[in-house]
Image (spheres, rainbow, N blue to C red):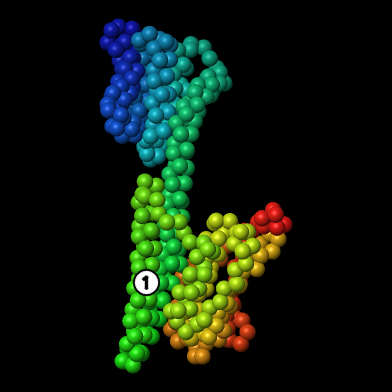
Amino acid sequence: MWESTGPAVQVLGALPSLAAAGTLVWAVARPRAAVRQRLGRLARPTTVWAALSLTTSFALPKAGFDSGWKLAESAVLLLLLAVVTRWSPLRELKSALPLTALAVALWPLPLMDSESFLESIGIATFWLLPVAAALVAGAYPRRQELRRRSAVAEARSAQRLQLSRDLHDFVAHDISGIVVQAQAARFVASTDPSHTVLALERIEKAGLSALAAMDRTVQMLHGPEAPTTEPLPDVSRLPSLISDFTSAGATEAHLDLPPLATEALSREAGSAAYRIVLEALTNIRRHAPDAPRATVTFTPTATTVEIRVTNDRGARPAPARRRAWRGGLGLPALTEHAQALGGTLSAGPHGDGGWQLTAVLPATLPKETS
């Protein structure tokens, strides 16, 4: 090892400190938008300065200003390590971390003339503590940023799924109504033109409703800065839905909705109830278009509201192709939604070839009626 403390040797001993400090100045002395990008590129320079620090620590132990200079050098390396841990890619951090830790942990050893092996281990271990602190200082905000990004990604995924369910629940009902009206108009066009005109009016109404649902979905995609849109329908819209369903096909639908059930359902549960009835009626139109009767019954209890949608058997079975087609988002998605609210949903055969959907949603009865 060199014992000289001449000017050239002092410059060499100070080189790692000056280079590391200059690297930090280079990274931060930029417009704010460019600082983060440069901070992410400090891993390789930090690796070089740590290797140079190790070299000068053992090759020039008496260079520069002895322990004071090396202590300042270690402080700069620790700061660089924290920055690299926070901003640099992991593959580059893997190369910078070991050398920087060694440079900080081993710098006092060449300055001590008589120490045992155990003392050397103790000194190196002690100087690993600030290395761990630098790692924590950089890793904690990095982990928080990753968690934030993960939460944003999950929220976006949930929003996309919710939007797809909105389109399925509302647009599929309107489209199925258009199909039914078009089929009816085709059969009576030559014998009853007035019925055809009525069917075209209903097709227009259903088409406008589908366009409104798609417009609402597109506006929601624009984010929170989008203009306020019409809230999702709730049970107050069910009478209109039942009336439109009856007038659009061969099935006569009846609604039994006590005022107590409407008051007991929260806004979210009311919206879910509307969707459940909408999906049930859509399935009746799709799979039993000529069923003579369908009933929608709301039954309030002390803590829940039971929704029961039942349809009779159609005069003719639905085609096998339609039976096999499941849609993919309707009842399974509504079942998950009901369970998320603390309720249940089930569907299955009923009576002589009919079908029944039953949902139970949590509710709170008004205090004056409890």
Between residues 41 and 109, which one lies in front from this camera angle?
Answer: 41
Residue shown at 32% from the left, 87% from the top:
193
Where residue 370 appears, as percent x and y from the top left, is 72, 57
Q: Does residue 204 appear to the left or right of 164 in the view shown?
A: left
Nearer-the-camera pick, 146 or 159: 159
Q: x%, y% of residue 130?
A: 49, 23
On the question of residue 263 being in view, the answer is yes
| The quadrant where residue 176 appears | bottom left
Quadrant assignment, res 357: bottom right
Left or right placement of residue 272 versus residue 13 in this view = right
Residue furthest right as drawn: 370
Q: Which residue is mark 1?
A: 205
Q: Secondary structure at mark 1?
A: helix
- Residue at image location 46% in from the left, 34% down from the top: 141
Q: Please say if 103 is above or below 65.
A: below
Q: Quadrant of the N terminus?
A: top left
